[in-house]
Image (cartoon, rainbow, N blue to C red):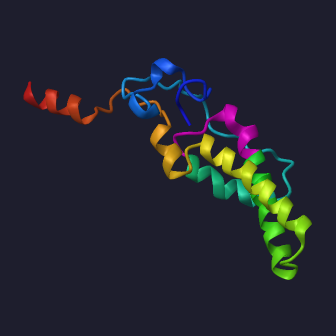
């Protein structure tokens, strides 16, 4: 993620090595993710497992992406269960890998991997001071 031409962050927001500059400002979202009332029970359970992991990162406008992540999580679990019964089934293996790639891409976008967490820009609360600001305030 990051770097020239990657499309993940504008070049002027990136520092050395493709890492986000500390001065970059994240665009805050509004509200909280809204779970569709029409999700099947098992997919709704996956939603309920995912949303707490996204606290402070996901907002109302992310609801569709979270729903997609819930569906993919449910599908991956189904394929993995089936693969326990039929471990040599090539079609199930391909489906499981395809779902895993899609799920991994969404997890990366939400900062749920160690690498993507380093690049994720989360809006800072106005009253929250970083270490330098706190040190300067203490000196006053």
Farthest bottom residue? Answer: 85
Asked if residue 39 lies left or right of residue 33, the reply is right
Front residue (pair 6, 54): 6
Query: Based on the displayed image, in which of its 4 quarters is residue 90 positioned?
Result: bottom right
Front residue (pair 96, 67): 96
Q: Is residue 61 magenta?
A: yes
Query: Based on the displayed image, in which of its 4 quarters is residue 49 positioned?
Result: bottom right
Asked if residue 127 lies left or right of residue 29, the reply is left
Magenta region: which residues? 55-67
Magenta stretch prevailing secondary structure: helix
> Where is residue 78 drawn, in percent x and y?
83, 67
> Where is residue 16 drawn, in percent x and y?
39, 30
* Placement of 4 over or under 80, stated as above or below: above
* Placement of 64 over or under 139, stated as above or below: below
Number of marks in the rendered image: 0
Farthest left residue? Answer: 139
- Residue at the image position 68 percent from the left and 31 percent from the top: 61
Asked if residue 28 lies left or right of residue 43, the reply is left
Query: Based on the displayed image, in which of its 4 quarters is residue 33 positioned?
Result: top right
């Amino acid at each position: 993620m990051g770097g020239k031409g990657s499309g993940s962050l504008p070049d002027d927001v990136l520092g050395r090595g493709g890492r986000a500059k500390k001065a970059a400002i994240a665009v805050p979202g509004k509200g909280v993710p809204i779970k569709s009332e029409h999700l099947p029970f098992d997919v709704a359970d996956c939603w309920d497992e995912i949303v707490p992991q996204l606290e402070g990162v996901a907002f109302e406008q992310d609801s569709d992406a979270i729903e997609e992540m819930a569906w993919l999580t449910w599908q991956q679990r189904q394929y993995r269960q089936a693969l326990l019964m039929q471990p040599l089934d090539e079609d199930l293996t391909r489906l499981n890998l395809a779902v895993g790639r899609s799920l991994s891409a969404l997890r990366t976008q939400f900062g749920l991997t160690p690498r993507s967490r380093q690049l994720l820009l989360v809006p800072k609360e106005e009253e929250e001071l970083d270490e330098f600001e706190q040190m300067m305030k203490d000196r006053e």
